Image: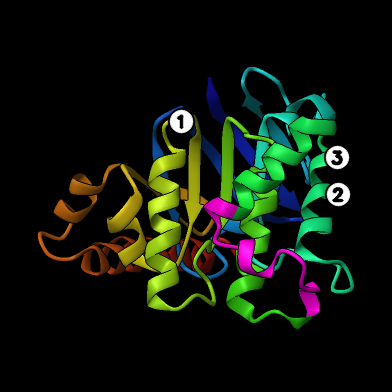
Amino acid sequence: MGIAAEHLVKRYGRRTAVNDLSFTLDTGTVLGFIGPNGAGKTTTMRMLCGIQKPTSGRVLINSIDPALEPVSARYSLGYLPENAPLYGNMTVRAFLFWCGSMRGLSGRTLQAAGDRVMEQCALLSVANDEIESLSKGYRRRVCLAQSIIHSPSVLVMDEPTDGLDPNQKREIRSLIRMLRNHCAIIVSTHILEEVDAVCDSVLAICSGRQVFSGSVAEFRAVSGGTLEDSFMKLTAENLKTAEKSGNENP
């Protein structure tokens, strides 16, 4: 059970946003997905979730290709986008129950799932509040709750602690560590502290290409210093290579 990318390529006209990206992630593992702005992370995640079709290559979620069977794949997938849309005039409870029903839950199963995620994401105190009245941190927790209400086996998260205070970040990181017991989790983040706190492995891309895949310890060893040092070393080297290639091929 898990998610795999096989030689993913995404082109927009003559520009290649993602170039031959492959990885496999099994249940019980948290992958930190990192790269500089414009590296192709968002495009990759949209392909992983079946929102965009790759130009070539494929994604498999529990052996299902979301480009071919989007509905079946999405029952196994939870997605937390960076700017998830919310219905401000709905209460937290009503919104989450609606999200659960869209994923095939009903009756007592839906009730139990809604109560579970509100407790996990510390939303019980605002369950009957309209979403538009909530702080950014609470809205982010609502977004997280909707992504796990159907107990997905694969969870893709884009900046999961964005907008949260230090205490809330600690709570969400604890939740991610708990969810890994029955999920394969991808965490896309600019916060390398987050990678160190919750991730087992790292996948780094730059200019659409994979530049590192390995454990957190192996990533740190790239520079012999901090995760930030390794990130800067890898991305600087590969940006120079990409710039040189571009100059040689106008």
Q: Nearer the viewer, mark 1 or mark 2?
A: 2
Q: What's the coloring here?
A: rainbow
Give the mark nearest the N terminus, 1 or 3: 1
Q: Which mark is residue 237?
A: none
Q: Residue at x 26, y 69 (%)?
A: 228
Residue 91 quadrant: bottom right
In this view, the residue in front, 27 or 146, is 146
Q: Position of residue 195 (x, y in %)?
A: 34, 57
Disc count in the image? Answer: 3
The residue where tag 3 is placed is: 101
Q: Which residue is mark 1?
A: 25
Q: Amino acid at mark 1?
A: Leu
Q: Is residue 124 magenta?
A: yes
Q: Which residues are magenta?
A: 119-132
Amino acid at the residue labelled 3: Ser
Residue, disc 2: 98
Mark 3 vs 2: CB contact within 8 A: yes
